[in-house]
């Protein structure tokens, strides 16, 4: 889970860094951003994640699409936050303001990473050894 928490922070850092590059990349702005959401709505990663990383990841999956829609909404919210942070950084009028915004982004990411780590940690008396063996076997294929 520490890796996931680290990855979340890393994503936030890459988002912050990429905001300085985005003005060169974004041609249509928010319209392009929402097109990616339209594409992502068609993707359900559970089968691939289950096969490659953790056979129990879909144990909480329920029949129908409601839980899939909820997962997708979470991704949309994360992406929306990243886009809004891009705008905040882009619109900062001074380097000091830009650095303050970057600090806020980092603090928010760290808080989310900590929340995710606490939410998905193994209960006392259990560990990831079974999942680790499964992942190692999948990597050999």
Image (cartoon, rainbow, N blue to C red):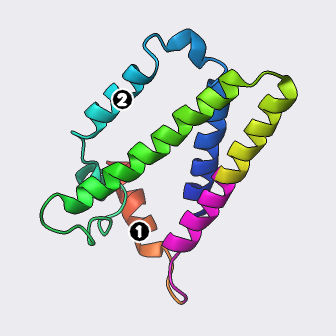
Percent from the top left, x then y, of residue 2? 61, 62
Q: Which residue is mark 2?
A: 34
**SS of the residue under disc 1:** helix
Which secondary structure type mostly characterizes the magenta part of the structure? helix
Give the Cα separation between the discs numbered 2 and 1.
35 Å
Q: Residue furthest bottom?
A: 125
In the rendered image of this protein, does residue 139 appear above or below residue 133? above
Q: Residue at x 41, y 68 (%)?
A: 131
List the residue tagged with mark 1.
131
Foreground tag (2 vs 1): 2
87 with respect to 29 (left or right)? right
Q: Which residue occupies 27% across, 65% down? A: 58
Q: Nearer the viewer, residue 96 or 49?
A: 96
Residue 72 coordinates in the image, percent (x, y): 32, 49
For the N terminus, the image quarter is bottom right
Count neighbours of disc 1 (C-alpha within 10 A) and say few if under 14, some if 14 to 19, many if 20 or more: some
Q: Residue sitting at 81 percent across and 31 percent down?
A: 97
Q: Looking at the image, tell me whether mark 2 or mark 1 is earlier in sequence order.
A: 2
Q: Residue at x 27, y 32 (%)?
A: 39
Q: Give the magenta range.
A: 109-124
Image location of residue 136, percent across then percent down: 42, 58
Q: Is residue 74 magenta?
A: no
Q: Examine the structure image and report whether residue 117 is included in the region drawn in magenta.
A: yes
């Amino acid at each position: 889970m520490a890796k996931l928490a680290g990855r979340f922070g890393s994503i936030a850092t890459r988002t912050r860094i990429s905001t300085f590059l985005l003005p060169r990349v974004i041609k249509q702005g928010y319209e392009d951003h929402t097109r990616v959401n339209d594409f992502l709505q068609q993707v359900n990663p559970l089968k691939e994640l289950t096969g490659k990383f953790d056979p129990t990841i879909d144990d909480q999956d329920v029949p129908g699409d409601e839980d899939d829609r909820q997962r997708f909404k979470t991704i949309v919210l994360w992406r929306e936050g990243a886009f809004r942070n891009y705008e905040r950084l882009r619109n900062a009028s001074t380097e000091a303001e830009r650095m303050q915004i970057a600090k806020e982004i980092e603090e928010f990411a760290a808080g989310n990473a900590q929340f995710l780590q606490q939410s998905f940690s193994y209960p006392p008396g259990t560990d990831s050894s079974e999942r680790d063996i499964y992942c190692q076997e999948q990597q050999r294929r």
